Image: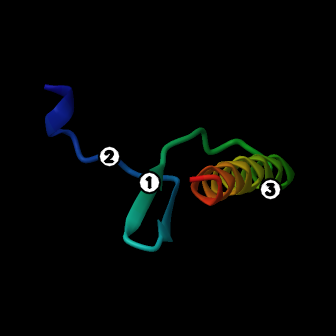
Amino acid sequence: MILSKQTEYTATYQFGKTKVNMIGPNDVSEEEINKILEEIHTIGRKIIKQEFYKNETK
């Protein structure tokens, strides 16, 4: 059964009370990883900004 296998995570990040486990190929360069993380942060900032403005207009 696939769920009974112990999964190895490439990286684990903690954002407040949220734990994010990343699973990915090991052959990704450091430059590619940094680009992906930058994109994740950009998307996160957009979500926060959108929620802030949504709450501000209420």
Q: Nearer the viewer, mark 3 or mark 2?
A: 3
| Residue 39 position within the rendered picture, expressed as x and y whole percent measured from the top left | 77, 47
- Find the distance from the CA under tag 3 to the CA under tag 1: 16 Å
- Find the distance from the CA under tag 2 to the CA under tag 1: 10 Å
Q: How many marks?
A: 3
- Residue under label 3, please give it: 34
- Find the distance from the CA under tag 3 to the CA under tag 2: 23 Å
Of marks 3 and 2, which one's residue comes earlier in the chain? Answer: 2
Q: Quadrant of residue 19?
A: bottom left
Viewer-closest of 34 and 10? 34
> Which structural element holds mark 1?
strand
Amino acid type at mark 3: Asn
Amino acid type at mark 1: Asn
Q: Nearer the viewer, mark 2 or mark 1?
A: 1
The numbered dot on residue 7 is: 2
Please, which colouring scheme is shown? rainbow
**Label 1 near label 2: C-beta < 8 Å?**
yes
Q: Residue drawn 40% across and 63% down?
A: 18
Of marks 3 and 1, which one's residue comes earlier in the chain? Answer: 1
Amino acid type at mark 2: Thr
Q: Residue drawn 79% across and 54% down?
A: 38
Image quarter in which the N terminus is found: top left
Viewer-closest of 5 and 33? 33
Of marks 2 and 1, which one's residue comes earlier in the chain? Answer: 2
| Residue 16 position within the rendered picture, expressed as x and y whole percent measured from the top left | 45, 74
The numbered dot on residue 48 is: none
Q: Residue drawn 66% across and 53% down?
A: 44
The numbered dot on residue 21 is: 1
Q: Is residue 10 above or below residue 28?
A: below
